[in-house]
Amino acid sequence: MSEVFELIREQSFLQRALLAAVLIGFANGFFSGFVNLRRNALSVSALSHTMLPGIAIAVYFTGHLSQLNAFMGALFACLLVGLSSVLVGRNSRIPQATALAILYTSAFAGGIALLPFLPVSVDLHEWLFGEITFVSDSDLKIAFLISAFTLAACILFMRPLLLTLFEPNVAAAQGVPTRLMQYLSFLLLVLMLVASLQAVGCVLSVGLLVAPAATMLLYTDKTALIFWGGGIIGALAGVFGVILSVAIDVQPGPAIVFTLGTVFILSFLLSPRHGILLKRHTTD
Amino acid sequence: MSELHSDHECCAHHSQHHELVVDSLSVGYRQVSALKDISFSTSCGNRVALIGPNGAGKSTLLKTIAGLTKYTKGSLSWRGSRITKWSREFAYLPQREEVDWNFPITVRGLVEMGRYPQTGMFSRFSKVDHAAVDQTLEHLELTDLSERQIRELSGGQQQRAFLGRAICQEAHVLLLDEPFTGLDRTAAAMLEKTILSLAEEGRLIIASHHDLSNASEIFNQTLLLNQRGYGFGPTEELLTEPNIESCFNA
């Protein structure tokens, strides 16, 4: 194990990877609180796949890949697919979730088909599963900015966001702009997905955006703990995943998400509060 | 159904300022009218039952008074001024099936939500806010349960937790949607006691209610409502066999 730490001390790309894992892991883990409370893990999965064609189209038209055009492309594709699914759901007998499943897989397929025609060389593998050890200093700055912005927005709007999630009609009546809150959480979600693209890729980003708070839900009912605990689990899993990837020579993205999955399953079994093996009966 | 408007005598001793006046109120969704031309008035200290068959518009009326649903005609006024949107003085307690019981919120968290209208959406809780929460929990005998998630409570405790939020909000008018549904006898008795004491403290309680056998013990006034018409008056006078018959079998 000491060789691993030695290696990390020597290699600046590993240090950057660790820092990125902490930042992205924390911000995603914190935001996963909202994903869990909205119960829309499956829509997050759909949106994360939709980012691929969005970013591919943005790269196709602008000729280069940057965080900004990745974000714009992802946002555009997510909006298009998301709103189209609502349109189909409202105007036919097909439920919105079914429409979403059809539209996002089609968009994803289109994106993959577009990849060979892009003016920059891209490794499909990197898009799907990320490559956190390739982060540059400027990537790190952008990841920091996105994470800081998302966290600040989440903390500032925590009360209206929570009230909107818990009782939308009461929130609306109390003067909370619930529509705006829904758009805000959508925007933050896309930001988080783009931020985690480099770390874990578009497929695995779902893990980072769902598992941390889902794990916390097995331990606590305090809303604040679910968010902050989710952030800490995300950050720790990020660090552990990077170390694991160095130690046993696997890719860091999958290592991070696999770590999160393992922690979730262990919690499901062993959590003193809601784990199936040790559950206490709290209701009198 | 005969229209009774004898409510004015029964609450004449209350201040005019604490009067809720519902005047020719109509609520419609698209072409369908959910409530048509309802008028009655009541005041703080009263306990009003909304009784009628499903689809009569009981929930709609509660939500409209609470400011959650917009009315299409008529007017609503409280303490002499017209209400057009939600105010802190009104608290609505949803029907059981409308609540997401798995939401990770504790009893304390729920009661704290009642302070949001005072503190605003962004400021921190002051000592006064914390004290109000503690006091409410104690008042409703919820202190020992304050760290429990809302699903881990019995039906009666859940109702008390939502009442706690309303009290913490310092609401004067409590609008309860089927509060007794699903409660066992002990819990119902406790809720009845709570409702009586909240009204005695000067609050106006309006609740949709199904159990005709105990309505007159809990509620001193009743609005008997179906899709065709309504009647309002003291519960004992209004809930007669013929009135009930004509309300439910119309």
Image (cartoon, grey):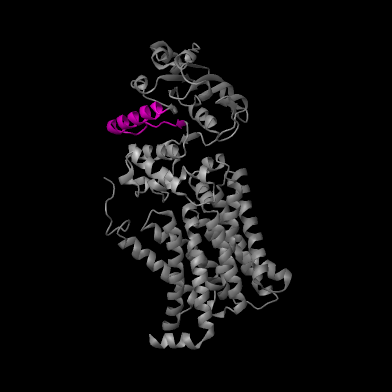
Residue B54 is covered by the magenta coloring: no
Q: Which residue is drawn at 52% across and 37% down?
A: B88
Left or right placement of residue A268 versus residue B203 in this view: left
Kindly tell me whether residue A177 is visible in this rendering.
yes
Q: Residue at x 55, y 22 (%)?
A: B22
Please provide percent x and percent y for residue A244.
Answer: 42, 79
Q: What residue range appears in magenta? A: B173-201
Q: Determine whether B168 is above or below A240 in the image.
A: above
A158 and A1: which is toward the camera: A158
Q: Which residue lies furthest to the front in this view?
A: B127
Asked which quadrant contains residue B110, the reply is: top left
Kindly tell me whether residue B250 is visible in this rendering.
no
Q: Determine whether A250 is above or below B243 in the image.
A: below
Q: Which residue is drawn at 52% across and 70% down?
A: A23
B138 and A168: which is toward the camera: B138
Asked which quadrant contains residue A149, the reply is: bottom right
Left or right placement of residue A210 versus residue A145 in this view: left
Please provide percent x and percent y for residue A242.
Answer: 46, 77
